[in-house]
């Protein structure tokens, strides 16, 4: 757009700069400073201590377990998210809206409640758990339980990213593909995927960030056994309770690093999407 | 938001069996299987567990004095946190959409930090900042205010973790707002403040309310960030999620699930309410 | 209230939107700003309203300089292209808005506001829709509500940006007639923007044709069509057939084709412009013109039959178009591929040095050869 509108509410310089100043102050105190303190605390004992804290055997095990949980959770929710998004945006059927609401439940439910739901069902007193226990299968207080609650907590992310985008894009391109004779897989791979790849990437990154950092639900079902069922987020808590603040922040700095990567990926994805739309905006006006 | 994507229009669909695109049965099967296994089955587990309790016992557990105190703390803190986020979120969304200034893109990106940062990390970080010897804690101490290890700390933690909701719901609405509406109001003689109050705010209102409601829902369930900074004193700064956790550690599964059932029902009602309210409002604006 | 536009210039970055525009709109007149997109017509309208600020120049209402006046103070009625109705307000609330935002001491009582809104809605014949939301209205209804809202402050100047652009042909015609009646009844001064020449010619007292930030010509619709002042105006108002050639001894030639002029012309390189009704088709050439053409297509559009023709033995950048009556069509039965000859009754020529076209006529007797007529 080559035009500048002159009349907009809030464009007087004093209003504008007061609001920008306020927003900047809030951003710095509430968002920037927390990041700063994570890293200053983590490095407060020097680089040696920092590395020592990270290479501690319990920490290493926690890192390994966390990555393992994420590596299982992300693909499961990726597949589910894509199928669900395809279902609710490409077809009309009774109960469609209910399904879209159902998928939001993990967002609304407290993570502690989420953990409890699984503990009640699969714990040794639970009605499924006791049946499994008779067959010597223990899911709770071991890694399968951690994976299960993590899947629960993170299952909406991919679908939530894809649904609005696929709804907005409509189904005409896929219909054109069918008319031209494409099979289901070809259609997805050649028509749908190129359109949704960036949103899908962001959904995956968000799922990953949450899977790696989940605390409440995991703490209910993990049993917090050091070197066995301790994820990185739980490890942070454990160290903190032990008054090993520097160690806790060292582990926290890894999680903060993943958070920063997530934010960077999101900015990148938004930039890509804005660029895809940009050529349309250029020729919009005749004024 | 003024145009419904074609997929949403009711009554336009082809008959079952005449579906054009492939994969209906497969995607329906996968989705239903997954949702049943991951979402519905565990919820039934809770219902079975609580149904096993007698009504009197259930009532006694959920109205226990310490539990009631935790409802109150959680509700108050979540309400205040979401109101704070309504104001702060509106400010950030407004500034990000309406103005150009150095650092804008960075600010926009940082808004997502609370969603990306694990709650436990947020918890210890906020505690470090607001503890009496922390950077902010010292400043507040000068004013004689204690934030960490008091209910005030709960509000801080809840505001932090749910900050992005309002910003991200209001931002797109403000971006899509047609400048002509503002110009029309001004050409009819409205002042800037009137334009904001009568035209912009009503346009943002549904998004703002949705954002506040989402922020409230999230705050009710927040656990990781809160427990570090709250101090967790019974009757004073114990949140409801922690109560469930405490009962679990006492191996009182029945009590834990009774309290959890209250929380679950409350959050499901909130979720449903938000969805219905949004649908109603959108219908009015789109004339359907 | 008259509007005077004096030397208005506006740039958007490197784009010259308006270049030293001056225009007088007399009190009570309805003026159309007509031009292709990018010609600056909307920008000019927005500058008159005060929604945009000019880089230089002045705007006067009834002789009073309002250039520095904020939109809020100018008290004009403005109808936006896409109506800009407030979505969250009912029709009645939309129309009442201007009255309700008046400062407390000027604001009418609530009952009076309701009364005024009712009157306005009756005027646009939509009283029964007072409690609907804009999303529940059709395009034509929205347009009328937008108009009622613009008139709520009793403006003496009404500005309309592509008022019928988004409506279908039938509704458009009805609204046009209705707007004209309204204008005549209430006597405000109106300026409207359009890119539709038919709309401009039908509705306006005067039309200002704009191109590339300049006003090409301001005239009554009749004169604009009969005596276009420039090549651009000529082209923009309806289809025109062009014969390009060199003048030698009163004859314009190109390839095998020629036209003998009846009056002296000074330029050597000539372009003759002929509207489709200024040309007739014959089965053989005429004493003053030899323009062989082949019929490329025959289309029956409404009252006339339109023939699209391509030159034989000469060249034209665009195909020729000539309209014939249905009676002629039935007599002649032209088909694709048939050959015929064009004979100009009237042609327009733009001579070097002067921008305005000159009209050339041939004496009636020269072309009344019944044997040659189709």
Image (cartoon, helix red, strand yellow):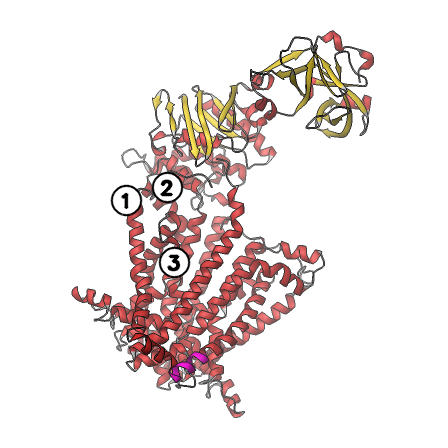
The image quarter in which residue C277 lies? top right
The mark nearer the N terminus, 2 or 1, is 2
Q: Quadrant of residue B230?
A: bottom left
Q: Which residues are magenta?
A: A56-65
**Chain of the residue on which disc 2 is drawn:** A
CB under 8 Å between callouts 1 and 3?
A: no
Disc 3 designates what residue?
A: B166
Q: Which residue is mark 2?
A: A8
Label 2 CA crowd tier, 10 Å (few <14, some 14–19, many 20+) = some
Cβ atoms under marks 2 and 3 closer than 8 Å? no
Question: Label 2 vs label 1: CA separation?
Answer: 14 Å
The front one of B183 and B201 is B183
Give the number of marks: 3
The lab-note entry on whether marks 2 and 3 share a chain reads no
Q: Of circles 1 and 3, which is in front? A: 1
Question: Same chain for the residues at labels 2 and 1, yes or no?
Answer: yes
| Residue C28, placed above or below residue A236 | above
For image coordinates 48% across by 67% down, the residue present is A205
Main secondary-structure element of the magenta-colored stretch: helix
Q: Chain of mark 3?
A: B
Q: Nearer the viewer, residue A213 or B31?
A: A213
Q: How packed is label 1: few (under 14 Cα within 10 Å), some, or many (20 or more)?
A: few
- Which of pointers 2 and 3 indicates the residue nearer the eye? 2
């Amino acid at each position: 757009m080559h035009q500048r509108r002159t009349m907009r509410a809030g464009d007087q310089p004093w209003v504008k700069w007061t609001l920008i100043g306020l927003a900047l102050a809030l951003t710095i105190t509430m968002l920037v400073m927390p990041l700063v303190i994570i890293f200053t605390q983590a490095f407060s004992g020097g680089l040696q201590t920092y590395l020592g804290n990270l290479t501690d055997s319990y920490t290493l095990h926690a890192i390994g377990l966390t990555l393992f949980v994420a590596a299982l959770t992300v693909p499961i929710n990726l597949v589910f998210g894509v199928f669900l998004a395809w279902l609710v945006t490409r077809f009309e059927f009774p109960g469609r809206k209910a399904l879209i609401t159902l998928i939001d439940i993990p967002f609304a439910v407290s993570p502690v409640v989420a953990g409890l739901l699984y503990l009640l069902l699969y714990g040794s007193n639970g009605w499924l758990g006791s049946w499994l226990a008779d067959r010597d299968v223990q899911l709770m207080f071991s890694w399968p339980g951690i994976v299960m609650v993590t899947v629960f907590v993170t299952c909406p992310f991919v679908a939530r990213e894809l649904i609005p985008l696929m709804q907005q894009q409509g189904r005409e391109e896929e219909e054109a593909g069918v008319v031209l004779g494409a099979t289901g897989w070809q259609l997805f791979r050649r028509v749908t995927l190129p359109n949704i790849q960036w949103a899908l990437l962001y959904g995956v990154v968000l799922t990953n960030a949450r899977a790696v950092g989940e605390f409440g639900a995991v703490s209910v079902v993990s049993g917090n056994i050091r070197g066995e069922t301790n994820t990185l987020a739980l490890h942070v808590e454990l160290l903190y309770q032990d008054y090993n603040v520097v160690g806790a922040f060292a582990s926290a700095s890894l999680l903060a690093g993943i958070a920063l990567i997530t934010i960077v990926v999101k900015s990148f994805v938004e930039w890509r999407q804005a660029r895809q739309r940009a050529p349309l905006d250029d020729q919009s006006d005749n004024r | 938001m003024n145009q419904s994507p074609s997929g949403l229009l009711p009554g336009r669909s082809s008959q079952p069996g005449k579906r054009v695109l492939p994969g209906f049965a497969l995607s329906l099967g996968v989705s239903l299987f997954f949702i049943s296994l991951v979402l519905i089955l565990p919820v039934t587990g809770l219902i079975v567990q609580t149904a096993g309790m007698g009504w009197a016992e259930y009532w006694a557990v959920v109205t226990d004095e310490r539990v009631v105190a935790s409802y109150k703390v959680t509700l108050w803190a979540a309400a205040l946190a979401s109101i704070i986020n309504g104001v702060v979120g509106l400010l950030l969304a407004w500034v990000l959409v309406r103005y150009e200034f150095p650092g804008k893109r960075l600010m926009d990106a940082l808004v997502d930090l609370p969603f990306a940062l694990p709650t436990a990390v947020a918890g210890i970080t906020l505690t470090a900042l607001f503890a009496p010897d922390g950077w902010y804690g010292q400043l507040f101490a000068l004013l004689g205010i204690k934030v960490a290890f008091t209910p005030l700390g709960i509000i801080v933690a809840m505001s932090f973790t749910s900050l992005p909701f309002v910003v991200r719901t209001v931002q797109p609405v403000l971006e899509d707002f047609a400048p002509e509406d503002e110009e029309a109001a001004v050409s009819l003689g409205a002042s800037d403040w009137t334009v904001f109050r009568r035209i912009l705010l009503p346009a943002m209102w549904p998004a703002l309310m949705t954002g506040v409601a989402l922020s409230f829902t999230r705050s009710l369930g927040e656990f990781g960030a809160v427990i570090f900074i709250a101090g967790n004193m019974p009757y004073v700064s114990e949140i409801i999620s922690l109560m469930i956790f405490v009962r679990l550690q006492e191996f009182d599964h029945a009590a834990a699930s009774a309290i959890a059932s209250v929380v679950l029902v409350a959050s499901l009602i909130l979720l449903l309410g938000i969805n219905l309210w949004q649908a109603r409002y959108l219908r009015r604006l789109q004339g359907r | 209230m008259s509007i005077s536009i004096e030397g208005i210039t506006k740039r958007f970055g490197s784009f010259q939107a308006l270049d030293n525009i001056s225009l007088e709109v007399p009190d009570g007149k309805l003026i159309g700003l007509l031009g292709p997109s990018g010609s600056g017509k909307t920008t000019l309208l927005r500058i008159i309203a005060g929604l945009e600020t000019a880089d230089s120049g002045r705007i006067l209402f009834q002789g009073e300089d309002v250039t520095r006046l904020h939109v809020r103070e100018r008290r004009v009625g403005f109808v936006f292209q896409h109506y800009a109705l407030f979505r969250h307000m009912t029709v009645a609330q939309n129309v009442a808005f201007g009255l309700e935002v008046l400062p407390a001491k000027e604001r009418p009582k609530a009952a009076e506001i309701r009364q005024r809104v009712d009157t306005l809605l009756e005027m646009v014949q939509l009283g029964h829709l007072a409690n609907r939301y804009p999303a529940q209205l059709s395009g034509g209804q929205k347009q009328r509500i937008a108009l009622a809202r613009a008139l709520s402050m009793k403006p003496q100047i009404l500005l309309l940006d592509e008022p019928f652009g988004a409506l279908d042909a039938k509704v458009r015609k009805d609204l046009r007639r209705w707007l004209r009646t309204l204008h005549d009844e209430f006597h405000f001064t109106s300026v409207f923007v359009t890119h539709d020449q038919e709309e401009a010619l039908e509705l306006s007292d005067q039309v200002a044709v704009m191109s590339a930030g300049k006003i090409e010509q301001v005239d009554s619709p009749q004169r604009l069509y009969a005596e276009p002042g420039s090549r651009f105006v000529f082209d923009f108002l309806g289809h025109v057939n062009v014969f390009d050639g060199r003048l030698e001894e009163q004859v314009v030639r190109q390839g095998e084709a020629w036209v003998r002029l009846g009056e002296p012309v000074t330029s050597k390189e000539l372009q003759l412009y002929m509207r489709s009704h200024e040309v007739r088709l014959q089965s053989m050439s005429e004493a003053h013109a030899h323009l062989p053409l082949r019929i490329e297509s025959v289309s029956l559009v409404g009252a006339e039959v339109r023939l699209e023709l391509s030159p034989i033995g000469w060249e034209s950048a665009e195909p020729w178009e000539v309209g014939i009556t249905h009676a002629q069509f039935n007599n002649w039965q032209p088909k694709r591929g048939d050959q015929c000859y064009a004979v100009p009754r009237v042609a327009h020529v733009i001579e070097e040095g002067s921008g305005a076209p000159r009209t050339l006529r041939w004496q009636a007797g020269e072309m009344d050869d019944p044997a040659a007529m189709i």
